[in-house]
Amino acid sequence: MPTCKRLLPLLILLLTGTACAGGTTPLAEAEPMRSYVWYDGDTPRQAWLDAEVVAIFGDRNDSVDAAVRSLAPAARQLPSATPGLRLWRLPQAVRAARSLQTLEPDARISPVLRDSPSPDGPMRALPGGVIVHLDPAWSSEEAESWLLSRNLQPAREILPNAFLVPSEPGLAALELANRLRQEQGVVAAMPDWWQELAPR
């Protein structure tokens, strides 16, 4: 009997520890937001992925909105002050964005990133497109040859030897920008970001 009395507190401690380790307690820490690096000229910047918000660019499309609701019936639309942009809150936003892009290949869909590791940080997203600044000493013919050799058709020339080139929307645009900035002759390359003007 004395042995049982000594074992009872140990048994309670083990059971409590098991429950906490299982993550069922409300005090369990939330998983940190994943961060990505992009470059503002030569300056590295960070953006943190919001795992619950996607951005859909372009005119309202009922079939895209229906696809959102079919993937996540509990999804809800967030207010947006930007014409032609719809923000949706839904679980597993990156996976949902990929699924939506498969269902609606003509839509421009991006996960939302934040300028700080806070779920309330200013938002930014990737509608597609990369701004590439090439060597200013190059002639227009040299710049055009560089673009064509990499199958980059410029959408428009923003400044002399600075071009907006098309890309897939979403993280593919960020990956392309980071890859291009390492190329010889590139002064800078960054995604053509959409940015929230007034944090909500």
Image (cartoon, helix red, strand yellow):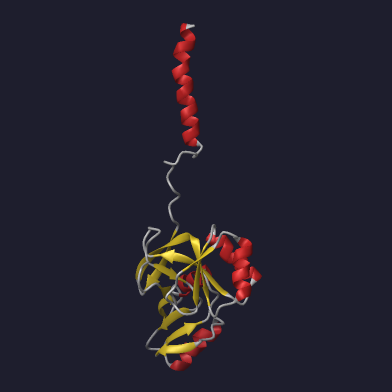
Quarter-wise, where is residue 168 in the image? bottom right
Q: Residue 45 in the image: x percent, y percent?
A: 37, 66
* Left or right for 69, reference 183: right
For image coordinates 47% across by 17% down, the residue present is 8
8 or 169: nearer the eye? 8
For image coordinates 53% across by 77% down, the residue present is 167
Q: Residue 155 in the image: x percent, y percent?
A: 51, 87
23 or 170: nearer the eye? 23
Above-or-below relation of 95 to 8? below
Residue found farthest to the right:
103
Above-or-below relation of 132 to 54? below
Above-or-below relation of 91 to 189? above
Quarter-wise, where is residue 151 in the image? bottom right
Give the number of callouts.
Answer: 0
190 or 200: nearer the eye? 200
Above-or-below relation of 169 to 135? above
Residue found farthest to the top:
1
Q: Residue 89 in the image: x percent, y percent?
A: 50, 62
For the C terminus, give its image quadrant.
bottom left
Q: Residue 115 in the image: x percent, y percent?
A: 37, 65
For image coordinates 59% across by 65% down, the residue present is 98
